[in-house]
Image (cartoon, helix red, strand yellow):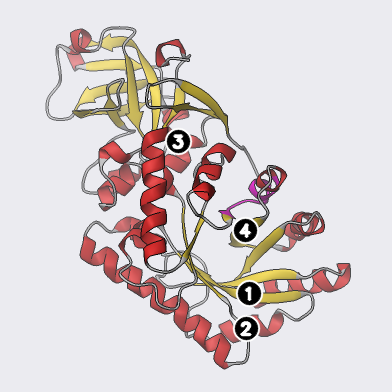
Amino acid sequence: MKLTELMTPVALIDVPRMQHNIERMQTYVSKHGASFRPHVKTSKCVDATRAQLKAGAQGITVSTLKEAEQFFAAGFRDILYAVGLAPNKLVGAAALLRQGCDLKVLTDSVQSAQAIAAYGTQHGLSFKVLIEIDTDDHRSGIKPASAQLLEVARALTAPACELVGVLTHAGSSYDLNTPEALIALAEQERSGCVRAAERLRQAGFTCPSVSIGSTPTALCAQNLDGVTEVRAGVYIFFDLVMHNVGVCALNEIALSVLTTVIGHQEEKGWAIVDAGWMAMSRDRGTQKQTQDFGYGQVCDLNAVALEGYTISGANQEHGIVSRAAEPDLAIAKRFPIGTQLRILPNHACATGAQFPEYHALDHEGNSTTWSRFYGW
């Protein structure tokens, strides 16, 4: 199908841009001597994930057990569930193990580790477990030097548990915007996770995997000494937050929302489109950054950014296109009713989550439907 045949709003993937992003990340990580495990929560799409593995990725990372179930059913076996495993998720994780999934799970507390070990003992299962490390005070995890690290390792008793490594995510990288700061945080992430692994090994535990990563730090790491694998997710599409961080150009953003002009408020310099926050999501991640893109950057039908024009306001099904510098009082002539526009999102993960499918565009602008997973 051609874009003009699609019922808007729809989510579009520019496949050449996506392929460029995949190859860029894979080449960078491979050059530094680590394997790459993409975080597929961004696309939640089998077609996109197959492109990542074809480029050289080894295994996948997921953020929900439903993702793990769906990808395993689609033929992906090596899966890392990179969210702390709560006791109520053990049944679902166990079901995947029994089906033959090479599932790795995550913990960062003695209580959780004990629950995993107890369940494995009771049901005759062995869970492969990584310990989450906090290297930047961003979210969850154990500090590399904390005594709790060894306590958790001791709670992962064999044969119900196999300690297979440590994992960290420098999510605070999203708040940075200079190469120097990103390089420094990438090194902090690397050294902290490697230090945790060294402490475990010195205490007599095996720790074969040292897994680090966020899109900004993965692309800015100067060395990966001691690291076995890197993870990143949003890089496959990129978005406006990543643009403001400084790791991609606007013309590398592969996800957009196709929308149609449905009306005007000429005296205000507004064009009204049929993509509101239900299409773009309510994520305003650029609001706290150096450049605020509202609910998204407006582009023409060829995904060329129209400088100064953003979705400046949004209701459920209505978006307001306006110019930042001064009202465009000729906006009705610039964007007549029926004009199709493409909107680059603030956060690709959040915008993708608004749609049940993508329309993947080839070099000639023809679209193919790619399904997307929903829910938990």
Q: Is residue 376 shown left or right of residue 338? A: right
In primary-sequence order, the first of circles 3 and 1 is: 1
Q: Residues within 10 Å of mark 2 (few under 14, many from 20)?
A: some
Q: Quadrant of residue 2?
A: top left
Amino acid type at mark 3: Thr
Q: Is residue 122 shown left or right of residue 241? A: right
| In the image, residue 282 above or below residue 143 | above
Q: CA distance from mark 2 to mark 4?
A: 20 Å
Q: Which residue is mark 2?
A: 206
In primary-sequence order, the first of circles 2 and 4 is: 4
Q: Is residue 311 visible?
A: no
Residue 184 horizontal/vertical position (percent): 28, 71
In primary-sequence order, the first of circles 2 and 1 is: 1
User: Tag 4's secondary structure?
Assistant: strand
Q: CA distance from mark 3 to mark 4?
A: 22 Å
Q: CA distance from mark 4 to mark 1?
A: 13 Å
Q: CA distance from mark 2 to mark 1?
A: 7 Å
Amino acid type at mark 4: Tyr
Labelled pair 2, 1 in contact (Cβ < 8 Å): yes
Q: Which mark is residue 81?
A: 4
Task: Tell me the residue at 18%/12% (across/down).
Answer: 267
| In the image, residue 311 above or below residue 350 | above
Task: Tell me the residue at 36%/43% (across/down).
Answer: 20
Amino acid type at mark 2: Thr
User: Tag 1's secondary structure?
Assistant: strand
Q: Which residue is mark 1?
A: 164
Q: Which residue is mark 3?
A: 351
Q: Is residue 27 visible?
A: yes
Q: CA distance from mark 3 to mark 2?
A: 40 Å
Residue 309 horizontal/vertical position (percent): 22, 27
Q: Quadrant of residue 60?
A: bottom right
